[in-house]
């Protein structure tokens, strides 16, 4: 751990200029940072300040095992930044903030004008004692996921064997992550935080708001998970609703409907066909270009469709991919499945995901008869309920699942067609947030901070703390991305 303690006033220590961000060594509060770059695998790497910060794995045993948190600060552009900090809370559960940030940094640019951005890999992710599994259930083309609770259980057993020497999974919960951020805040000089939480990160943000409201100046939640919503419980309904909107857009587009008919009907027929007779598909590997053969079955199809519905750019491809596969040309769909699987395996720490979900969601999670006929049915509850009895389970605070009541400034963001955290989730959370505003991006999916003028509205919110006064008319120009009618794109 590089934890060099020097006396400093928090407000003054945080007023580090953008020019000094290029120094090789500087300090904020009690922490020494070194210059670093984020996103090393990108052509356009991002300058930042990096360090590690040590915390107790078990907060009740400060003299027990210690773990390092991976910490970075992205500098503000202003030579005189504000004392309060932005804090990005990543999703998943299992995503690392420092790894995720380069992919969404465009959405933070207006926010970075006057404030530094704090990135902390949540315990169990990225460089913070990652709870990685040797075989996590992220291969969307693997049909074994759809049928075998024994396979799910074995995955959890193998994962536990891989992490038990360096971690006690009981302590990798949302509440302990909040304790980590509070301990770090003290070391930084006790600045107030402006939280920006996406997807599962919205749970961390709202839980933080309940637990430590005085530590926070403002909260932005994007892709909102209400506190009383068990993760995975409504995914089946939400996906069907999102796909219904995507497929309706194709039916309403003359070229798309003429070319593909009703994509929903085609998907249903293809799913049944693959259930009876999976398709053997040979194609060039999308990364290595070497020949590869994969079997496309019912759940492989469902996995690609589900994950491609998250963003409007990939959702626009779905009618074409489904139609091609239905006609026996499934190479493109399988290629997308291979790409998605590899990305997921790198991005998510499944052990940390289990630590969160098993402690915080599994007690309320149920397989529901009404979901059986939906596209993914009860697959996710089935997976979770099979794995959690194997996984060492932590605790959650009393009242953790109750709606968060607060008068702090909160901005809630949703995508109109979000297939996992739909706008109704944010509407539910907003009922007990008296100083909040909910903005919906038309025709967009999961995570919308970077869409249209949303980032500028977020920056204005953080500056002024007046959610009701935001003029959100600039969002009216957002619309649907036309469906692809060929691999060249939409019909001109």
Image: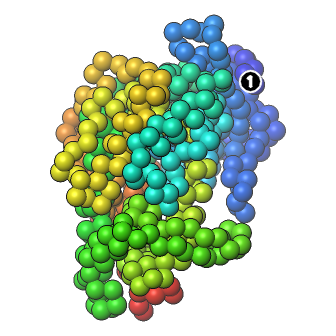
Color encoding of the figure:
rainbow
Residue at 39% across / 51% down in the picture? Answer: 147
Q: Is residue 461 visible?
A: no
Q: Is residue 2 found left or right of 236 in the rendered image?
A: right
Of residue 491 and residue 83, the one placed in the foreground of this image is 491
Residue 41: horizontal and vertical position, in percent?
72, 57
Q: Is residue 287 visible?
A: yes
Percent of width and height locating residue 427: 22, 47
Where does the image place residue 417, in percent across and percent down from the top left? 31, 63
Q: Does 174 sit left or right of 28 as displayed?
A: left
Q: Is residue 140 above or below residue 404?
A: below
Instruction: Pick out the residue farthest to the front.
Output: 276
Determine the residue located farthest toward the right in the rendered image. 24
Q: Pick whichever, 129 or 161, lies toward us.
A: 161
Report which residue position mark 1 lands on.
1
Q: Vertical placement of 376 versus 89: above or below?
A: below
Residue at 44%, 23% (x, y): give it. 393
Q: How many marks?
A: 1
Q: Quadrant of the N terminus?
A: top right
Q: Is residue 316 left or right of residue 171?
A: left
Q: Say which quarter of the image contains residue 349.
A: top right
Instruction: Please say if 162 is above or below 452.
Output: above
Q: Residue at x 77, y 41 (%)?
A: 35
Picture quadrant where residue 476 is located: bottom left
Residue 472 spot, x, y in % from top left: 31, 59
Location of the C terminus (image quadrant): bottom left
- Position of 203 relative to 373 (above/below): above
Badge 1: how crowded within 10 Å, few (<14), some, or many (20+)? few
Residue 381, image quadrant: top left
| Residue in the picture at 21% in, 35% down | 432
What secondary structure is found at the residue carrying circle 1? loop
């Amino acid at each position: 751990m590089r934890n060099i303690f020097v006396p400093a006033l928090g407000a003054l220590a945080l007023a580090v200029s953008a020019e000094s961000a290029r120094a090789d060594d500087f300090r904020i509060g009690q922490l020494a940072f070194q210059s670093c770059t984020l996103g090393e695998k990108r052509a356009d790497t991002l300058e930042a300040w990096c360090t590690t910060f040590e915390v107790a794995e078990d907060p009740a045993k400060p003299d027990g095992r210690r773990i390092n948190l991976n910490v970075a600060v992205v500098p503000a552009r202003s030579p005189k930044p504000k004392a309060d900090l932005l804090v990005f809370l990543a999703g998943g559960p299992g995503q690392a903030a420092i790894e995720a940030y380069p992919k969404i940094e465009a959405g933070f640019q207006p926010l970075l004008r006057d404030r530094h951005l704090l990135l902390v890999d949540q315990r169990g992710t990225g460089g913070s004692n990652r709870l990685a599994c040797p075989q996590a259930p992220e291969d969307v083309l693997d049909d074994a996921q759809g049928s075998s609770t024994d396979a799910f259980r074995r995955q959890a057993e193998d994962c536990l064997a891989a992490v038990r020497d360096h971690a006690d999974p009981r302590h990798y919960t949302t509440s302990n992550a909040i304790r980590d951020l509070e301990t770090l805040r003290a070391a930084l000089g006790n600045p107030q935080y402006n939280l920006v939480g996406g997807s599962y990160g919205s749970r961390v943000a709202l839980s933080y708001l309940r637990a430590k409201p005085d530590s926070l100046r403002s909260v932005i939640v994007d892709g909102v998970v209400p506190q009383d919503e068990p993760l995975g419980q409504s995914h089946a309904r939400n996906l069907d609703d999102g796909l219904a909107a995507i497929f309706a857009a194709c039916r309403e587009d003359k070229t798309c409907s003429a070319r593909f008919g009703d994509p929903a009907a085609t998907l249903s027929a293809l799913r049944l066909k693959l259930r009876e007779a999976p398709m053997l598909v040979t194609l060039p590997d999308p990364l290595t270009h070497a020949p590869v053969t994969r079997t496309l079955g019912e759940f492989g199809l469902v996995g690609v469709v589900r994950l491609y519905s998250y963003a409007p750019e990939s959702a626009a491809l779905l009618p074409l991919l489904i139609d091609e596969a239905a006609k026996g040309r499934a190479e493109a769909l399988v290629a997308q499945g291979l790409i998605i699987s590899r990305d997921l395996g790198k991005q998510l720490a499944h052990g940390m995901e289990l630590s969160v979900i098993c402690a915080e969601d599994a007690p309320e999670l149920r397989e529901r008869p009404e979901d059986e006929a939906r596209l993914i049915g009860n697959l996710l509850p089935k997976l979770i309920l099979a794995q959690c009895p194997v996984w060492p389970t932590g605790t959650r605070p009393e009242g953790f699942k109750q709606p968060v009541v607060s008068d702090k400034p909160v901005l809630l963001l949703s995508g109109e067609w979000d297939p996992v955290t739909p706008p109704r989730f944010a509407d539910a959370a907003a009922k007990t947030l008296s100083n909040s505003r909910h903005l919906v991006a038309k025709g967009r999916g999961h995570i919308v901070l970077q869409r249209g003028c949303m980032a500028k509205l977020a920056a204005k919110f953080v500056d002024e703390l007046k959610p009701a006064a935001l003029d959100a008319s600039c969002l009216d120009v957002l619309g649907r991305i036309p469906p692809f009618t060929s691999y060249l794109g939409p019909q001109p």
